Structure formats: structure tokens, C-alpha cells
Image (tube, rainbow, N blue to C red):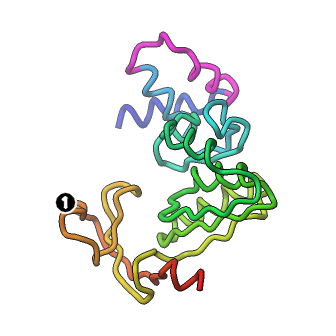
């Protein structure tokens, strides 16, 4: 509760000031952690990583996405392998961090297909595509599996832990908050 109050209080400071504070590397860990959370839920221009210069709103997701430092090795692999004109499939696109990067890398001559069955995540994904004015992204509000049809998506404690109920029991979240009915598509059926 106190942490949330401190974060909300800090959010009244100008965003540019908070972004500069977040770049200071010698701050105590607890202070740095609190400051990272001041960037979530805002449209910001990313200052680091392959996504540097792109606009992004992390919603209430991982603040590393707001800093541009989320999954740096994956960002670097994308930069190495994706070129202008390529096609990229973002399966389980969540709020669109990798969709945003890939849309930039494949440029307008390429295409990105982002699959996200959770309505709240798909809405945030759409927002992140719009604030960057990308026209090369198709958002598909379906889950992906080996066969098309209908299924249940188990919603975990955080949006990165959702899983289809048809998946192997060992990969399911240990506890999930709820489940939703989703349409499922097979990539093979889309490409044929």
C-alpha cells in the first residue's frame, strides 16, 4: 500500500525528469526499483535497447518494457535476424513489446502478425501499435495451437503466465485466477 502511494506521488513529477532519474545507475536498489514503476502506464519514448526511439505504454506490466531493457538478448536476436520486408509472427503478443520492435525492424515493406487472445492485452497491444503509427501489423485476437477451434485460456497471476488448458499439465501455472473461452487458430491453417 505504501509502495503504491509513493509511486503514485512520484508520478506527479514531469515524465522527462522521471526518465532521467531512471537512467542513474548508482541509485540504491530500492530507490531504483520504485522509480522504474513510475514509468508504467504512460506513453513514453523508449531510451534503451533495440526499441530505442519507439513509443510504448507498458500498462501495469513489467517496468523493464518501459525502460526498453526487457529481454535484451531477444531484442538483439530480433535485430540480427529481422530485415526489411520480412514477416514476423508474435504468438502470445501480450501488450506488444516484441510486436513494436519487429514492426520497426521489418519496416512498411514487411508484415507482423500479433496473436493475443486476452482482450485487455489486445487493447494495450493495439494502443502501442497506434502510438507508433504502424500500418504493417495485424492483430489476431486468438490463441495459437496445433489445431483451430475453441478452448479455455487459464489466466495466471500475471499476464505472462496465461496458458491454454490444452497444454501439458506441467507447463500450466500452479494457480490461476480465472479462465476465459478463446478462439484458437493454427498457423498452418492461416498460411495454407
Horizontal and vertical percent for residue 163? 33, 67
Location of the C terminus by quadrant is bottom right
Q: Compared to 26, does 146 lie above or below?
A: below
Which residue is at 48% across, 82% downward? 185
- The stretch drawn in magenta includes residue 144: no
Horizontal and vertical percent for residue 78? 59, 46
Q: Going by the image, does 144 lie left or right of 164?
A: right
Q: In front here: 105 or 150?
A: 105
Which residue is at 48% across, 40% downward? 71
Residue identified by numbered label 1? 174
- The stretch drawn in magenta includes residue 17: yes
Horizontal and vertical percent for residue 164? 33, 73
Give the quadrant of residue 123.
Answer: bottom right
Q: Residue furthest top?
A: 26
Q: Which contiguous range is marked in magenta? A: 14-30
Q: Compared to 157, does 182 lie above or below?
A: below
Which residue is at 45% across, 82% downward? 184
Q: Going by the image, does 126 lie left or right of 146?
A: right
Which residue is at 19% across, 69% downward? 169
Q: Compared to 178, does 185 lie above or below?
A: below
Amino acid at each position: 500500500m505504501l509502495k503504491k502511494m509513493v509511486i503514485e506521488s512520484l508520478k506527479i513529477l514531469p515524465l522527462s525528469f522521471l526518465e532521467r532519474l531512471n537512467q542513474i545507475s548508482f541509485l540504491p536498489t530500492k530507490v531504483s526499483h520504485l522509480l522504474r514503476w513510475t514509468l508504467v502506464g504512460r506513453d513514453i519514448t523508449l531510451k534503451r535497447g533495440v526499441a530505442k526511439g519507439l513509443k510504448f505504454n507498458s500498462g501495469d506490466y513489467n517496468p523493464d518494457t518501459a525502460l526498453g531493457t526487457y529481454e535484451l538478448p531477444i531484442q538483439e536476436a530480433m535485430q540480427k535476424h529481422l530485415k526489411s520486408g520480412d514477416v514476423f509472427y508474435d504468438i502470445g503478443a501480450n501488450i506488444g513489446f516484441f510486436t513494436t520492435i519487429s514492426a520497426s525492424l521489418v519496416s512498411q515493406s514487411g508484415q507482423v502478425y500479433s496473436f493475443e487472445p486476452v482482450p485487455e492485452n489486445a487493447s494495450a497491444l493495439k494502443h502501442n501499435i497506434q502510438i507508433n503509427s504502424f500500418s504493417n501489423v495485424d492483430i489476431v485476437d486468438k490463441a495459437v495451437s496445433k489445431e483451430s477451434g475453441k478452448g479455455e485460456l487459464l489466466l495466471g497471476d500475471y499476464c505472462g503466465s496465461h496458458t491454454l488448458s490444452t497444454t501439458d499439465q506441467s507447463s500450466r501455472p500452479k494457480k490461476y485466477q480465472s479462465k476465459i473461452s478463446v478462439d484458437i487458430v493454427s498457423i498452418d491453417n492461416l498460411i495454407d
